[in-house]
Image (cartoon, rainbow, N blue to C red):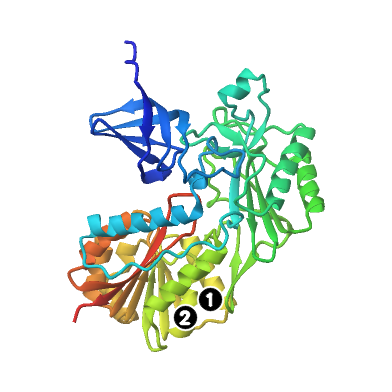
Amino acid sequence: MKKKNLPILTDIEITDVAAEGKALARVDDMVVFVPYCVPGDIVDLQVTKKKHSFMEARVLRVVKPSQLRCESVCQHYGTCGGCKWQILPYAEQLRWKQQQVMDNLTRIGHVNLPEISPILGSSKIYEYRNKLEFTFADHKWLTTEEMKAGIPFEPGLGFHIPNCFDKVLQIDECHLMPPIQNDIRNGIRNKAIELGMTFYNEHTHAGQLRNLMIRSNQHGQLMVVIAFGQPLNEQGEILLRFIRDSWPEIISLQYVINTKMNDTVGDLDIIVYNGQDHIIEEMEDLRFKVGPKSFYQTNTEQAYELYKVARSFANLNGNEIVYDLYTGTGTIANFVAHQAKKVIGIEYVPEAIEDAKINAKFNKLNNTEFFAGDMKDILTDDFIAAHGQPDVIITDPPRAGMHEDVVNVILNAEPERIVYVSCNPATQARDLNLLDTKYVVTKVQPVDMFPHTQHVENVVCMELRK
């Protein structure tokens, strides 16, 4: 059956910013979601999906650009799928993120709110990430225009095209990390091609080179990890020597052999080829050992601002027992430990908890304890009875928010304050509604960790109702 032709819409005004970095227009009482536009644009659209209550469309032509629109910096903008808000000035990005927080907390949370503090913008809007991961592909993905121009299908090293596990866009220049990562990535690709090495194919699961991770710290020191899809051979050895000898900034060069059907390496041994097995991140007087499997906030400078907000909201005087839920590698727990009597960190991932313990020992902190396991199974009334009633609970859950069982244990524990750090204000708002029976929101502080994206962090302080 022939698919019904979808309409072309002309002279449509973009009126708003929507979820997932898209923009929004309204046509005949129908909402239309459009990527790569800003409010005020007048555009012609090709509808790509039509449902009863909404449509999705792509831009055919910008008839009249918005006064807000600015030029994108990245040559891959619009194809890569990342940094969708590059064409929106940063001040406007912050305004929309502030509005996003307010809308979620009011429309979903339905709780009484204080005045929401102005969002804390990132001091860096480019080169702010400390970690990037890239994929090798035996045939780089080409746009229709590139194919028409006769550009050949060469091996590529870059990012996956959105929603396409088997399509990798060759990235020549990325502005999310300092320029040296472009030199390293392009240098590795060119040397591998020169050596005749095979790049990975997601369909046949064959190829020598699979993934590349680059991490950096505030001092410009680098970690590079190569994932090989086959056992290391002479070509692989030559490539590793080339990397070692070409960039002295790489103080940790490691590799892993991954012959599995997926890219995860958490269950695999990562081998140090040259240098050390970690790099050091610093925050105030604390130092954190970050290994290839460690989680660490990818915007280092802004993470410091986020954690300062959380510590301020906790309002510690040195006598409190603090529970840090979803502690990860214990960054927040260790960050507040000097101001607390004792800090208990709980996290699902055992490897993260081992990192947390290492970092506590590394910083000579003797008032922290860390436990690994499912939050709702560990954080029970018996656990609290054994480890002490929390005066303050800091919680930083994943995007899905907190399990209802965890919320109920928090309500039973009745800490004086809850500091809720969230990367998803929608699920945060849902949880605030559940906590509203015993707690009142006293402070709200949005923090922008990821410029040019729709993502926003939000910190909320709740006080026990008297």
Mark 1 or mark 2: which comes first in sequence? 2
Mark number, residue 360 = 1
Could you say whether the residue bearing mark 2 is in a helix, strand or loop?
helix
Question: From what the image shows, is residue 245 above or below residue 60?
Answer: below
Q: CA distance from mark 1 to mark 2?
A: 9 Å
Q: Closest to the observer: 430 or 59? A: 59
Q: In the image, which is nearer the foreground, mark 1 or mark 2?
A: 2
Quick check: 235 left or right of 98?
A: right
Residue 287 location, quadrant? bottom right
Q: Circle 2 is placed at which residue position?
A: 337
Category of crowding for the residue at label 1, using alpha-carbon neighbours closer than 10 angstroms: few (below 14), some (14–19), many (at least 20): many
Coordinates of residue 65 in the picture (x, y in percent): 47, 37
Quick check: 163 left or right of 271?
A: left
Q: Amino acid at mark 2?
A: Ala
Could you say whether the residue bearing mark 1 is in a helix, strand or loop?
helix
* Residue 403 appears in the rendering: no
Category of crowding for the residue at label 2, using alpha-carbon neighbours closer than 10 angstroms: few (below 14), some (14–19), many (at least 20): many
Quick check: 250 left or right of 339?
A: right
Quadrant of the image for the C terminus?
A: bottom left
Quadrant of the image for the N terminus?
A: top left
Residue 11 location, quadrant? top left
Question: From what the image shows, is residue 294 above or below residue 311?
Answer: above
Q: Amino acid at mark 1?
A: Ala
Identify the residue shown where x is 26% and y is 64%. 432
Coordinates of residue 179 in the picture (x, y in percent): 69, 51
Q: Closest to the observer: 31 or 420? A: 31
Coordinates of residue 90 in the picture (x, y in percent): 50, 54
Mark 1 and mark 2 in contact? Answer it, CB < 8 Å: yes
Identify the residue shown where x is 79% and y is 58%. 248
Coordinates of residue 277 in the picture (x, y in percent): 66, 61
